Image (cartoon, rainbow, N blue to C red):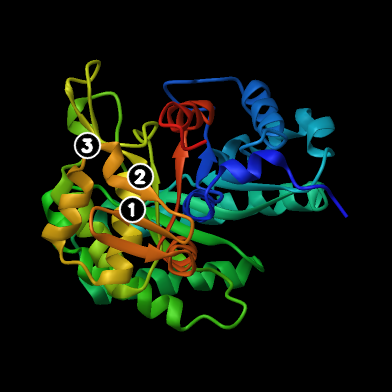
Amino acid sequence: MEAPDPSDALITPSLRAFLHEVVDYAGLFPPADLSLHRAFQNHAEYRHEEEAWMLSRFVLPVRRLPDLTTNRPLLKEGAPYDLSVLGTGGDTVDAFRAAFERDLEAIEAFDEAHAEQAKVDVMEVALPDALVGGSQAEGIDFLESITRTLVATGTAKLDLFFEVPLRRDAVASLPALCAAVAEHNSQQAVPARTVVGLKMRFGGAEPTDVPDVEEVAALIVACRDAGIPFKATAGLHHPVRHYDDGLDTKMHGFLNVFGAAVLAAEHALDPPEVQAILREETADNFRFLKDAFAWRDLTVSIDDIQYARENLALSFGSCSFEEPVDHLRDLEWL
């Protein structure tokens, strides 16, 4: 029997449940902009760190899959790697489907070459512009066409997360889009060939790349109400909402976002209540207890944290794994 890790005693069970496999490592992307070899080597090393329980998938563009062959020695180390690829996408439905077919071919070729060492089971890709602000019926038709493509290519398992631009027309149509996604997911056999969810971007090179609190709350509530998952990316290196001097704007915290999601799921919070959690800037108002997570006077049990993390708020992409960990250490939670 393996001896317990002494560091485990320092981590409250609720924090471990809250942050379990929460970070998708995306070191290839700005501002890190690492080479593929360096980024993948980092990911391999993080799998042996004390905080490896926080680490989820390695993220790379689908077109870079062949380049992983040069990292074959690392691929052979330890358990198989879980990969999330960024799809090519397309502005129109026809352009998207053509690119999607090519992306699936690249995934199939990679899987055949590295079946025992790594698997691509998630794709993140922008929703076609033509569907942004569209109706539920348009969303259902699009997802049905995607399913037909997956069946035709023989893809066994690939979950899809469609990035939605958080502009006014997109936010207004979120309930219709989420309803279409929920309808698609409900039609999946068991085990599902593809579970569909949404993806939200939290930052970028410009202040305008940071979505408003109202927009973030709208997506969380829409996904919660429809029973579909979401992923996040960019701009979530810090645990708690704060002012960023470089961008000259307020930035979201990953504790705010995921805390808002798990509490919204447990307490059926309305958008203004979710917004209040997203606006919280005092770290001490988030508490990780032995048997629950709490924000102010709202609590959620470990079982319900795990349920929300598995079914609603899945993970966030970050070009740094070390920064979120270091900030949590500064707060003395790790």
**Secondary structure beneath disc 2?**
helix
Residue nearest the viewer, comparing 36 with 290: 290
Residue nearest the viewer, comparing 82 with 334: 334
User: In percent of the image, x 43 and y 24: which residue is there?
Assistant: 30
Q: Are marks 1 and 3 in contact (CB under 8 Å)?
A: no
Vertical arrangement, residue 103 with respect to residue 147, above or below: above
Q: Amino acid at mark 2?
A: Leu
**Pointer 2 local density, CA inside 10 Å: few below 14, some 14–19, many at least 20:** many
**Residue marked by disc 2:** 255
**Pointer 1 local density, CA inside 10 Å: few below 14, some 14–19, many at least 20:** many
Residue 156 position in % (x across, y down): 66, 68
Give the number of the disc on residue 259: 1
Quadrant including the N terminus: bottom right
**Residue marked by disc 3:** 281
The answer to whether residue 90 shows anywhere in this view is no
Give the number of the disc on residue 170: none
Residue 63 position in % (x across, y down): 58, 38
Residue 326 position in % (x across, y down): 48, 26
Vertical arrangement, residue 43 with respect to residue 109, above or below: above
Q: Amino acid at mark 3?
A: Glu
